[in-house]
Image (spheres, rainbow, N blue to C red):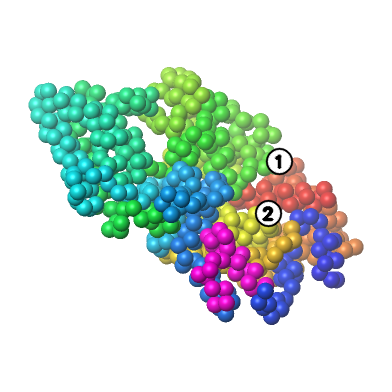
Amino acid sequence: MQLAARLLQLPLGLLLLTSNLVIAQSPEDPWEKARWIHKAAKALGQSEGLSEKDELDRLLSMNRADVVDYFIEQPAFADATLGAFLHFMGRDVDKIKSADPYTQGFTYNPMAFTVPQAIASARRVMDNRQLDLFTMYPDLVLRPMQTPRRLFGDLPEKEQREAIRDTMLEGLDQAMQTLKGAGAGKISGCEKLRNTLEAVDGGLGFNAAGFDPQLESMIRNAWLSALVEDPAAKEMQVQPPLCSRIDVTGETIAVELNRIKEAFTSFFAAIPDTSAHTPVKSLKDFIILPQPPAMRPLITPFSREGFWNQLRNTSTNYNRKRSAYMLRTYFCDELGAIEIEPSKHSEKKHASDPACMSCHYKLDPLAGLFRTYGTQGTNFENINLLIFDDGIDMDGDRLNAYLGSWKNEKGEWDVGYYTEAGIPHRNWQGNKLSDFMTFAGKAKDVQMCFVRRMAEHFIGPGLTYDGVWLNELADAWQTEDNKSVGFKHLIKRFILSRSFETFDPQPGVCYDGPSQTETNRPPCLIASIVETNCKSCHNTSHASGGLNLSQWVDVGEGRFGFPHLKNGIQRDPKESFQILRKRITGSELGPKMPPGRTIIPTDRQKFYEWLTQIIEH
């Protein structure tokens, strides 16, 4: 049968083996290669495609792998990386940067600074350092240094900064000495700190020294507000500041202040030697400030602008909006509804109706990681109060009942990433938001989602990708000692793929497949799901229930399906698919498949939707 005719006979979404769909490549045509080079240049960060310096004739003479290496080594690749990481975090932007006519450089999209792990990881890729995507404390990446204010005459730039730094540290030293004094020392020292806080825009000196203005805002919110009352954000100060506590001595506050002083010193030491007023051309021009390990982190992956203000909670939504974002972002789970049977876990819980449980069994436990976070991300842990973004507050019995909705009969937290109703992921440990980031950095489910999102970004959305192929790419990336280097290798595989090479790809066709394939392999959309979860019991040599899920064959009259025998006779394909759909959801036909093991929720969802599409076609 000719390829075109065979494709026309396939139901929409019914995907066949890649090797059956890809036509043998003819000798490379220079015009086609030029189109591919232009497409590769745009995908790898050069938004306008080829530039004059790229020398098309030279690129045409290179093999494709070397062309990709050339573009990956360009500074613009960091912009492509940043865009890809923002896509993974669900914060896509149309343009990463725009021309700045005043500096002859570029201005980066503000969204990039609201997702700290994205910009920190993109910056790390440039230096081949480990990624920060799945850490609770990413690098602090700030805009390039500006020329310091001339507060000390005509001193050179470097000496101006040193003078500003010394003046800052001198003021902190005076406050520390006062705090260490007996009696009124605490009162006077705290008054000095309060004055510093009120004049923070100029008092700290970071702005005067040319630092990114957001640094002073971070220091005020994260560090100084813990020492003295901040009149600008009193409602955000859940814990009383140290200066307001009668049980805290001036010496104790002085110790905390000394740690801040050491952090200040480390920031100035991190200033690069390059000119402070160089126009911004790429992420390479941004500076990295290491977060002092002894201090409260200035940033986390959950920033106020990029996360908390985007995903506000209320006293009635139980953080489900935040949970849905986490499932969509880290697991590529769009929360499609499938029929599943309710479990004991759902009894007396909110959203326990069987029709809702296909989402809530995983939505609610993950939401429990945010149980103590209230307005604008304020953590009310160990406080008999919780204020929500809608202005409602809870305390006492009402707060205990709210928190208790995430506890089981033993009083233990039922929170985290759950793959079945009442069953957490086999590698899940902990009950806090920080535990999720530890889990995400190692979970295969998350890595697979990341690779899929990267394919969407660099090759194109809406295409069909073979799950086994993506799985091979994810495994190769994870085995790399350096994940930034591995990321470059991953993107190189994408740009060299048939999926990327093909202009106007056809919907429902997998253009790339695994390194080794079997004859009559199941459709590529669900092949990896079947291979991982079903094939051990339903194969050619052992077809449990008469069903062989390792083969995809013509079962008669030009219709394709799985070999599924009843009394030695092949079942009608539609009947076979209906039985299979019931077994993966759990029904009167028997226990939910696969027995005795869990399946990634998104895989079950994908298999269910694929079967439904075939049945209804």
Residue 75: x and y in percent read 45, 62
Horizontal arrangement in the rendering, residue 70 relative to residue 527 (left or right):
left
Q: Report helix, strand or loop for mark 2.
A: loop
**Residue closest to the eye, 427 or 172:** 172
Location of mark 2 (residue): 462
**Mark 2: which amino acid?**
Gly
- Mark 2 or 1 closer to N-term? 1
**Residue closest to the eye, 423 or 63:** 63
Residue 28: x and y in percent read 67, 78
Q: Which residues are magenta?
A: 32-58
Per the image, is 51 magenta? yes
Location of mark 1 (residue): 339
**Mark 1: which amino acid?**
Glu
Q: Report helix, strand or loop for mark 1.
A: loop
Q: Residue furthest right?
A: 557
Per the image, is 386 magenta? no
Measured along the vertical axis of the image, is residue 201 above or below residue 398?
below
**Residue closest to the eye, 89 or 554:** 89
Query: Count the marks: how many?
Result: 2
Residue 357: x and y in percent read 64, 36
**Residue closest to the eye, 414 or 158:** 158
